[in-house]
Amino acid sequence: MIQFLQNLIDAIALGSIYALVALGVGLLFGILRLINFAHGDFITIGAYALIVPSADVTARLLIGGWPWPVMIPMICLIVVIVALLADALVFRPLRRATSPTLMIASFAVSYIIQNGVLMAYGSRPKAVDLWSGANTQVLIGDLRVPMLQLITLAVTLVLMTALTLFLKRTAYGVQMRAAAEDFRMAQYLGVRGNVVIGIAFAISGILAGVVSLLYTTQSGSLSHTMGVPLALFAFVAVVVGGMGSLVGAVVGGFAIGLIVTMLQAYLPPELRAFRDAFAFGFVILMLLVRPAGLVPARSTFERV
Amino acid sequence: MKAKLLMRALLCGAVAVAAPRGAAAADDGITIGMPVAFSGWMEAYDGEAAKMAELWIEQTNAKGGLLGKPIKLISADTKTDRVEGAKVGKQLIDQGAKLLLVSADYDYGAPAALQAQKANVISVFIGASDPKAGILGVGPLSFSANNAAQLEGAIMGEWGYEKKGFRKGYMLIDETIEYNKSICAGYEWAFPKKGGKIVGQDTFKGLDPTISSQITRLSDAIRTAGVDNIMLCSTNPGAASSVRQLRAAGINLPIMSGTAMDGTYWLNSTPGLKDFYLPVQALTVNDPRPAVNEITAAYAKKYGKPPTTQYAYPIYAFLDLWAKAVTTAGTPDAAKVVALLNKDDKAETVLGPRTFTPKLHIQIGMPMFVVSYADGKETPVEEWQIKETIPDSVLYRLKK
């Protein structure tokens, strides 16, 4: 029982990271029908922004060494700028393109960012020590609850609530939801499409920046492909949760975290190497039962 | 069709340009070709060994070259791309290379090495740890300058049992690349052979955001089965990340690992790391052998700083052996030189004894230095040589 509870805690912890990434991917999909595979690379940018840009093998903290009230907004700002640049240079000229074209374009952005990081920082993975104070754990009886996981969970819930409030209560939020529902109709009604999309990119940049800080605190290492598996799993989370639904993205993130952790915990040793294959198998099963995802978005059906 | 014609025209052009250079190269010295990654992610693994090869050539030429002729180096960038590797490998052979130094990984070096084999030219992987990097995977003219990954795991298993008194091991295997599985295969062979017991194992992927469920299983094994050492078979960035997470979870057991973790550049991720051990062929700082320190000093003088990891060194020892064989044979001709190299039985090099046989062109029994990490530094503990020969079933990881 203790073992199961511990696995559950691990699952929630992994799920909250996936949920946070999925929120960023899901937001852009909802509005732009863009499956942004470069979201993982936005996370990479945020992590690399912590250190002095150089190809030296030993990384030195730059922004990462600043006090957190300055550091967090600064990292988010850098990722937001990169996200807005990606929008302005790549996605804006493709506004009328189909979603497969947009997805291919996002692969291109991802590839460019990865190679840019390789050029600027060299190819050897970097090591940084960020907030190791958060890397402790709380013991509740026999249960081990890592502090960082609590922080991640709290951050996920706060950001999800904030985003929901923003979408429901503010003028831009309402415009964004209108654009997500029917982009052309919203434009006819006076919603400025590019501004709304720009805001969506900026928000996804903030989310990516936050993930990069949490992830780096956990792993202490940086590599040019570090964000790729996160974006992949987040995308799957978005599909599982229901494409176009923000609550769905978060639910999907937790679902994926739960599936992956439980498979890792309960698969026999010789099958554990194929954990991801089993996880994706589950995803297929889930989609066969609920094709529109766990929390279907209202706008999904008419578009399929 | 047009594109094909254009490609053919370009290829003919390339051959036409290459041919006269090849003819010239044959006259004015012995040419070594180096198709390795100068860009892309493999650069981290090829770059320093390539620089070391350049240093060796410079030093050899200063001593009068080989067979009275200067050695000429021609290199090309594979851009961490296998197709590009085959292409530039072929180009360098066409330019008259008598020895081809290829990328430090079996998968990435093999395309160029196969071109060398086809053209009857010797090839050497500058740092590959897969026993296939050589005769089995390329052909009888191919070598690896490095040791098999299995040797690293076997050394740690034996040394840990005898010197640290470890009895109950736990393997944590990063499934990202084959090298990791091979290290643990060596440990899994050597540790129980001594009398140790592997009480559990788990897998993860280097870029997994967290290894918390692996930590849960390990903590359970520590509590119930009394694990006293962890064999971590991984490479960076996954390795540094898992060490950080293990220590953060309060698991302070000794951790042993493979050579890929050599160097102190990753220690920022786990400040204050101690009780961490791995085997190396050479130390970049304060190697117990003065000759190795001389190489390091020459390297630092030429390039401004010493190598980051031990992977810079193995090619130096191989080139020494190759030069000796060429001198004895009186020619760089592949068949004659390889016949001599195949007779190298514990041949002395600056890095210690090296053995090649007509069946195996990678080191599986040489001694290595076990190093320990503490206070942000790597210090040699002692030299260790395994007592028995690693069997083929472990070297090629055949099904049990």
Image (spheres, rainbow, N blue to C red):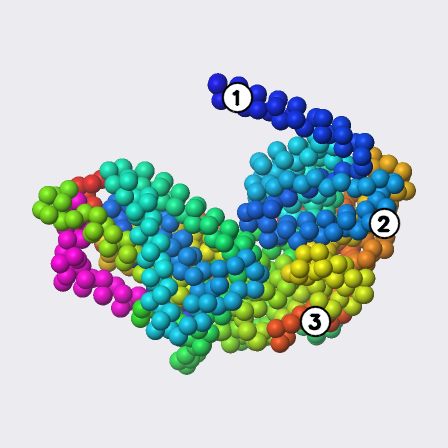
What residue would you read off at disc 1? B6
Secondary-structure class at tag 2: loop
Magenta residues span A156-183
What residue would you read off at disc 3? B379
* Magenta span contains residue B395: no
Question: Subunit of mark 1?
Answer: B
Q: Nearer the viewer, residue A204 or B150?
A: A204
Q: Position of residue B249 (x, y in %)?
A: 49, 74
Calculate the distance from the C-alpha at mark 1 to the C-alpha at mark 2.
47 Å
* Residue extending furthest toward the left: A189
Q: Nearer the viewer, residue A291 or A36?
A: A36
Calculate the distance from the C-alpha at mark 3 to the C-alpha at mark 2.
33 Å
Residue A232 left/right relative to B197: left
Q: Quadrant of residue B271?
A: bottom right
B400 above or below A102? below
Sequence-first tag of 1 and 2? 1
Q: Looking at the picture, which amino acid does disc 2 mark?
A: Lys
Q: Which dot, 3 or 1, sits closer to the camera?
A: 1
Q: Residues within 10 Å of mark 3 (few under 14, many from 20)?
A: some
Residue B68 left/right relative to B211: right
What secondary structure characterizes most of the magenta part?
helix
Q: Which dot, 1 or 2, sits closer to the camera?
A: 2
